[in-house]
Amino acid sequence: LCGTFKRNMSGSKFEYVKKYELPDPLMLGTFIVFRLDGHSFHRFSDEHNFTKPNDKRALELMDHAAKALMEEYPDIILAFGESDEYSFLLRKSTSLYNRRQAKIVSTLTSLFTSNYVFHWPRYFPDTQLRYPPSFDGRIVLYPTEREIKDYFAWRQADTHINNLYNTTFWALVQQGGQTTTEAHATLRGTVSKDKNEILFSRFGINYNIIEPRYRKGSIFVRTEIPEELLSSQTQTQEEDSEKSPNLQLEEERRPELEESTGNSETTTKSSKKKKKKKKGKEPLTKLELLHRDIIKDDFWEEYPAILKE
Amino acid sequence: LCGTFKRNMSGSKFEYVKKYELPDPLMLGTFIVFRLDGHSFHRFSDEHNFTKPNDKRALELMDHAAKALMEEYPDIILAFGESDEYSFLLRKSTSLYNRRQAKIVSTLTSLFTSNYVFHWPRYFPDTQLRYPPSFDGRIVLYPTEREIKDYFAWRQADTHINNLYNTTFWALVQQGGQTTTEAHATLRGTVSKDKNEILFSRFGINYNIIEPRYRKGSIFVRTEIPEELLSSQTQTQEEDSEKSPNLQLEEERRPELEESTGNSETTTKSSKKKKKKKKGKEPLTKLELLHRDIIKDDFWEEYPAILKE
Amino acid sequence: LCGTFKRNMSGSKFEYVKKYELPDPLMLGTFIVFRLDGHSFHRFSDEHNFTKPNDKRALELMDHAAKALMEEYPDIILAFGESDEYSFLLRKSTSLYNRRQAKIVSTLTSLFTSNYVFHWPRYFPDTQLRYPPSFDGRIVLYPTEREIKDYFAWRQADTHINNLYNTTFWALVQQGGQTTTEAHATLRGTVSKDKNEILFSRFGINYNIIEPRYRKGSIFVRTEIPEELLSSQTQTQEEDSEKSPNLQLEEERRPELEESTGNSETTTKSSKKKKKKKKGKEPLTKLELLHRDIIKDDFWEEYPAILKE
Amino acid sequence: LCGTFKRNMSGSKFEYVKKYELPDPLMLGTFIVFRLDGHSFHRFSDEHNFTKPNDKRALELMDHAAKALMEEYPDIILAFGESDEYSFLLRKSTSLYNRRQAKIVSTLTSLFTSNYVFHWPRYFPDTQLRYPPSFDGRIVLYPTEREIKDYFAWRQADTHINNLYNTTFWALVQQGGQTTTEAHATLRGTVSKDKNEILFSRFGINYNIIEPRYRKGSIFVRTEIPEELLSSQTQTQEEDSEKSPNLQLEEERRPELEESTGNSETTTKSSKKKKKKKKGKEPLTKLELLHRDIIKDDFWEEYPAILKE
């Protein structure tokens, strides 16, 4: 396996078939959004007895895999996750894998999946993984900041709507004793206000103080570590924006790991990296995990670097 | 996670961003070849002390993941693996995921990766997986049988050339006491005959009786189970074409698993499946694992169904 | 205009915008079908008083433009025209413009249009062209001979159905004195047999002896001129397959004209051409104009070279 | 030809080939730039004795064809032409032909070509068109205003560099008596300043007062006609920005012509148009022909509407 000399040794007469591969570069100057979705996760969550309406272990495992992806790929500057999906924003000027679509989609989906399976036991110590889960991935390009803000607003609005429904639904079932059919019927035609009312009046649940993670999803944002802090900080920061944050910073990407991302096909990236290393210029970054509103402008004003080159 | 009601509930004003997604259907009437390659597997094999020149456990794990993919996707009718790569042929008329490129590439890469990590302990009981490995995937389309035969011939010719080089190289190093630099120098400019000669005269190795798996790679071929055999057969067949085969057949895809591949996006497939199920017509198939020549015509003559619709 | 030194002299800081252009190569090993359609030709035919149901002048002008395209592009080996549309088949192995889609589509559409306008006065000596007509073009790829045969059968079946309808419709209007509304009503729900019956019993028209051009469309097929004929033949052959053909052969593409198709972008083609010229091997070909059935196999058996490389 | 009932009547068994056509929508939210280039215009200009270094008749014919394109397609809001090429900018939100790439490229190239041939006699009353010229077309997408400004700056910088070279070259040949080989040699290694110096000192030519059309190319910009002017204005405005402009306005697109662009495939456009017509809201626009600098910001500040939706 992986002999030192695998590729490019054969010049057989069959090699012409290689030319059938078509180029698939992603348009320059656009933001690349990569989104993953769990494949048949309805069944997967049943088989592994996920807690309803939200299974914190499962969400944290998703977050872990997302963070691992961002650690491996410095060009991912923002991520948003909810349920069994995660979206990643690559910085506009990225030349990751020369912006080749299939290469990016497949590699990122693979590494996320790999991390999900690899770290499963850490989040589900008492639940054995019964079969290998999978995800699908896709890329959508957006030309401007406007669409990027709206993309992430779209996903977070989706989180809100789904979570409010699910929270009310499962309260009706688990606490209210309704069957799932009855619960659906109860909710038919209701608007947000109605669901809040049901939760509060029937079950004493104030939806607005439910864990922000469930209501807002998970946001990872990459920020530069100011040089003056570099010596002292070493952990990841998780900020619960509506409570008091407990800071953790983590230094990004140990050098010896970065070596491993070297790939003969990412010449642009590689050469750039090397140049930058020489100059010692690539800024160290940290990843913050947030559970806060990203629909309003505050978030984007607070992190202006996300939408820069 | 994965509330019962996730999708399509939100009709927010942000939803317009969804329209930016572009269609990526793969041309009809062509053969789809999907190939996976290990990402940075040189380092991965070092970190996990893979045996040189071939690590049987690693190859068998690759085979296991490939077989799992074929069990999940009945439209994959042929596969060929060597080293850290695997190629899969979908039947020409497949409508898997409506032939959407990113969906197929990402899902197949994900499931393969997931199986690789999931089944690692079975093949490496004494070697803990140190970090999550990943693969990249790509799709190449071919219009006719000619290119398909030549594609697989190309990969197997590659297997031969690489394995002969690596076998000789590691013999020089491990048994001949050369440094890797010296071994490369020894091999510079040699042709196949020279390497065979080195192996035989210096190390008493007859290359032609080395395990077929190493020399020929792994081939999975899907064949229909004749109805009269259906009651008795239950295992996978591994045929070592140059020795006596030990038959193992395996009934393909348990019905309850097939349910799980249902996906709202694969309408064509789903409806077809349902129709077929109704008629009870979808033939049961088995997967054979072979290590034999697929460059010459014999193979294709023996398995004519591969290149049919 | 067209100074001798136009391109590639400027290395301004704006040149980066050039990199946004995306590659669009057409898959190798497939047949390229290029189809043109008149843009708003309903109005165009009204404004220029085209004869109903068929205007021979207009059809012959279409044929002329199609032939001019084939004379300029030796890789077009077959064409089929009806009404305001024309389809062209490029030989499977063509490397015209390196198989770049937009380049092929735009250049071929342009040259056809140009010929249509340029040669208008020859076919409409008494009708001035009132405004510039236009066409749209598209490319569809087909993997095998089967689809190519069926593509052309599809177009010719379309010719038949439309022409039978139109012929009957205009007989009802022009000879039967019906209004167009009445004629449509008369034809509603009728099948071919009914229309043939109407034509024959009411108007004494035997549909089967109407000009083959109207019933079968126009086919241009490129064939090699056997070397022994090369000295004597010089004109185009128009074969009316159902009557006696009047032979006309035309020597294809004078050498000095071929020079002018040289294009810096078609390196493959150019270099090939040069090689071939050296060897003096590129066969001279002629274009035959036919109006015959191409749905049945006879046609393809008679011209087997069309579907070769 | 163009019977009233051409399409969609045939439901033959061959119709499946239609499904092989692939979608090619252009990404939403991006600016579409469409550029035409003369095909083999070096030879074309020789064969028709174009004046060197610039043939005003030929340039004006190009302008005429460009203007005709803009009159037919209201979504083209800016154009820039030089030599045998022309670039067109479609407004960002255009849904012309549902943004289908091949449809746009082919139709626009066709209509431009058609106009070029159709109007030839008006600009070359004494020179018969010897053969039908052709153009190729391509589309490049740009995400933001920045790239659009730079694209047009790139083309105009190209105009300057080429025209200065050609002007000096032909002065050396036509007035200086050099052979073309000598003239090239004279210019080898010269920069702009050197060429200006040669022109002035040897030939008394002040490059800066050469016709702006030659130095700056041709710009067509579409602007809205303020409602209060609508009654009185009827012509096109040609502004020579460096001299006094002589105003000519032209009312855009007569309604009855717009009907003719109706196309069953441009549903979005059509329906929009109809809606707009109902509201009587689509503003009348005029086309101005300019020969001025568009590299500096002044131009874009003067015409801010170009880069709006």
Image: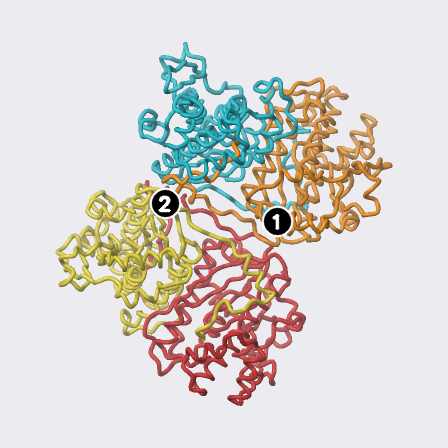
Chain colours: A orange, B cyan, C yellow, D red
Same chain for the residues under marks 2 and 1 in the image:
no
Instruction: Say which residue appears at 23% left-offset and 56% top-offset.
Output: C283
Report helix, strand or loop for mark 2. Answer: loop
Q: Is residue B12 above or below residue A110?
A: below
Q: Left of B71 or right of it: where is A229? A: right
Closer-to-camera residue (A99/A166): A99
Q: Position of residue D247 (x, y in %)?
A: 58, 82
* Residue B131 x/y as whole percent: 65, 29
The quadrant of the picture occupied by the N terminus of chain C is bottom left
Tag 1: amino acid: Ser
- Could you say where residue D143 lies in the image, as x and y percent from the top left? 61, 56
**As rendered, which of A301 and C44 lies closer to the eye?**
A301
Above or below, A250 relative to D130: above
Looking at the rendered structure, the number of numbered marks drawn on it comes to 2
Distance, label 2 to label 1, CA atoms, is 35 Å
Residue neighbourhood size for the residue with mark 2, other residues' Cα within 10 Å, grouped as few (<14), some (14–19), many (≥20): many
Give the side of residue A78 with respect to residue C47, left or right: right
Q: Is residue D191 placed above or below A138 in the rendered structure? A: below
Residue C29: image tag: 2
> Label 2 is placed on what type of residue?
Gly
Residue A117, how many percent across, how many down?
64, 26
Q: Which of these two is toward me, C167 or B282?
A: B282
Most distant residue in the bottom direction: D204
- Quarter-wise, where is residue B61 in the image? top right
- The image quarter containing residue C232 is bottom left
Q: Chain of mark 1?
A: A
According to the picture, the residue beneath numbered tag 1 turns out to be: A271
The circle on residue A69 is: none
